[in-house]
Amino acid sequence: MKNKIKATTDIASINKHQSLVEAMDIMEKRHISHLLVRENDEIIGIVTGRDIARKLADAHDLATENKMRETHFHVSSSVIMDLKTISPDTGIIDAAKMMIEDSVSALPIVEDGKITGIVTKTDLIKELVNSKKKIGDFYRKKPLELPPGTTIVHARKAMIDAGVNLLLVVDDDVLKGILSEKDIASGLREFRRALDKYKHADIHRLKVDDFMTRGPATITKDDTVSDAVKIMLDRKISGLPVVSGTSLVAGILTKTDLVKGMAEGELP
């Protein structure tokens, strides 16, 4: 692994007065999970896919079925003003440490007072694409798991309580799918459109299996970090269920787990 960070120079941004739905559309189109936020051509902060997903889900007010539309929420309602930045000379390990310690997924690079690039967890794990280490030491053995019949209301609360944005959908220890906060936000957006047409739709009847990604890519504990990284990059995903046998769940491996391994000097 080289010490020099290969950053993203094509920086995506959005005005703070634009809607969260617009921000989500940009992220989905560009396959990214963050946007720098502008005000009068000045960068004032950052908004992440996780923040947007939570806000859009909350816009439906799962407890009371509030009818407020998502388009009423602006980026300014979710922007993180405390922007963590690095210099062009920051090393890969130091960047990984900052991401883990500050719980951020992107670090803008500032040079001479201007943002010239951005480093994301995706950029960092690209440095592991040739790592032959086994994933066994890095994946989480006790991921958040819920059965497919769980309500979305309960799933949302469980994810918030656990501080995660991914959960595994499991039935009798067999993997059925994977659910992210982004899946929930996208699904609720489609539900709202249906609700406008079918007035009697009941948000409280929505289940995890209405939103989850079925048949997700998986890995085993004997696969290499390289194997995992290549799948994540190819499929543009942030986590992989770890299975044993055919579909028996053993755990989950995320980009965060890999970046943590880099920060602790265990990877590559």
Image (cartoon, rainbow, N blue to C red):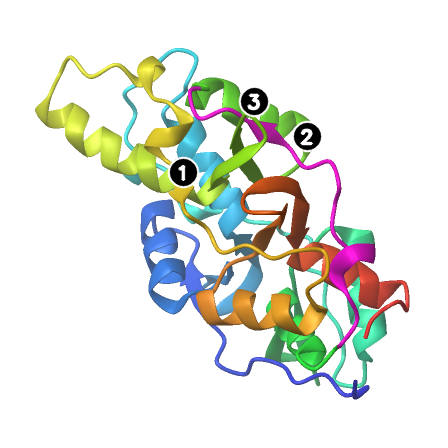
Q: Tell me which numbered mark, 2 or 1, is placed earlier along the sequence.
A: 2
> Could one spot residue 201 in this view of the protein?
yes
For image coordinates 31% across by 18% down, the residue present is 203
How far, Cα to Cα, is label 2 from label 1?
Answer: 18 Å
Task: Quadrant for residue 151, please give it.
Answer: top left
- Quarter that holds the C terminus: bottom right
- Is residue 148 a member of the stretch shown in magenta? yes
Judging by the rendered image, the residue that carries numbered circle 2 is 162
Closer to the chain start, of discs 3 and 1, is 3
Residue under the point 50% across and 75% down: 11
Question: What is the x, y in percent for residue 42?
Answer: 52, 68
The kind of residue on which mark 3 rests is Lys
Q: Which residue is mark 3?
A: 157
Which residue position is annotated with label 1?
Answer: 212
Q: Gap between marks 2 and 3, in whole Å?
A: 9 Å
Pick whichever, 3 or 24, lies toward us. Answer: 3
Q: Amino acid at mark 2?
A: Ala
Crowding around mark 1 (Cα neighbors within 10 Å: few <14, some 14 to 19, many 20+) is: many
Question: Which residue ends up furthest to the right in the rendered image?
Answer: 265
User: Residue 5's spot in the image, x, y percent?
Assistant: 72, 83
Which badge, 2 or 3, is on the more N-terminal residue? 3
**Residue visible at 33% across and 64% down in the picture:** 29
Residue 1, magenta (yes or no): no
Q: Does residue 23 appear to the left or right of 97 in the view shown?
A: left
Residue type at mark 1 is Met
Is residue 66 among what the camera can see? Answer: no
Q: Compared to 38, does 157 lie above or below? A: above
Name the foreground residue: 25 vs 81.
25
Badge nearest the viewer, 2 or 1 = 1
In which quadrant is the N terminus drawn?
Answer: bottom right
Residue 15, relative to residue 245: is it above or below?
below
Q: Which residues are magenta?
A: 132-149
